[in-house]
Amino acid sequence: EAQVTQNPRYLITVTGKKLTVTCSQNMNHEYMSWYRQDPGLGLRQIYYSMNVEVTDKGDVPEGYKVSRKEKRNFPLILESPSPNQTSLYFCASSFGYGSEAFFGQGTRLTVV
Amino acid sequence: GQNIDQPTEMTATEGAIVQINCTYQTSGFNGLFWYQQHAGEAPTFLSYNVLDGLEEKGRFSSFLSRSKGYSYLLLKELQMKDSASYLCAVSNAGKSTFGDGTTLTVKP
């Protein structure tokens, strides 16, 4: 089944404790992207990747890192999480940036 | 930068037609996406417009005017399951900027 898989789905962590949210797709998509969604707001793009080893900042990259060492995986790293990073995070992938995007089920992160 | 505006909320009746507008002011533009997002779920792709004009896909149609910085999503024969948030997003060479979304409530 074609899908984008994020893990974990839910995470509660403490300020400053490094964490990684994984994202994996099985559709051989070149384009992958991370978004955060806060109440009453639409999605805001954090980082995106056009292909392996190619990543670029979205609108809200501060406090986040990403890597794209292989085509199927695009992890989101929070080296020192802070409470303002409490949010719902979505990973998405597509063949290209103008193609139909498929989203993961989301990761609800709480930083206390 | 990018600025994208869409109404916060809309209400319509089952069986009716509703149009959700999206206006944008951007420093770059490749195309415009529409997504549907039901409460508690991930967004799902509805359409991507690159050229001016109307694109129809079943009950849903999307229109784009690049010169006016304007798009709309048209939903026909509304069903209760169409109650959701509708997000418009501008794509600029890989970078996507979203509006805050329009919450549509369909009433019987």
Image (cartoon, rainbow, N blue to C red):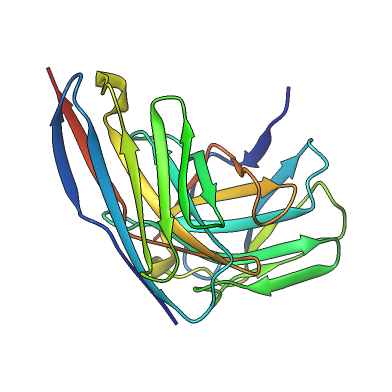
Report how many numbered discs are placed on residues in the image.
0
Classify the position of the C terminus of chain B by image quarter: top left
- Residue B21, percent from left and from top: 28, 53
Q: Residue at x 79, y 35 (%)?
A: A26
Q: Camera-side residue: B84 or A3?
A: B84
Q: Camera-side residue: B72 or B79?
A: B72
In the image, is B71 to the left or to the right of A48?
A: left
Q: Is residue B70 above or below residue A80?
A: above
Q: Camera-side residue: B71 or B81?
A: B71
Outermost front residue? B53
Do we see residue A110 in this rendering? no
Q: Is residue B63 above or below residue B74?
A: below
Do we see residue B90 in this rendering? yes
Q: Is residue A57 above or below residue A27?
A: below
Q: Is residue B24 above or below residue B84?
A: below
- Residue A65, percent from left and from top: 66, 70
Q: Residue at x 46, y 35 (%)?
A: B56
Classify the position of the N terminus of chain B by image quarter: bottom left
Q: Residue at x 25, y 42 (%)?
A: B19
In the image, is B67 to the left or to the right of B11?
A: right
Q: Camera-side residue: B31 or A37?
A: B31
- Residue B80, percent from left and from top: 24, 20
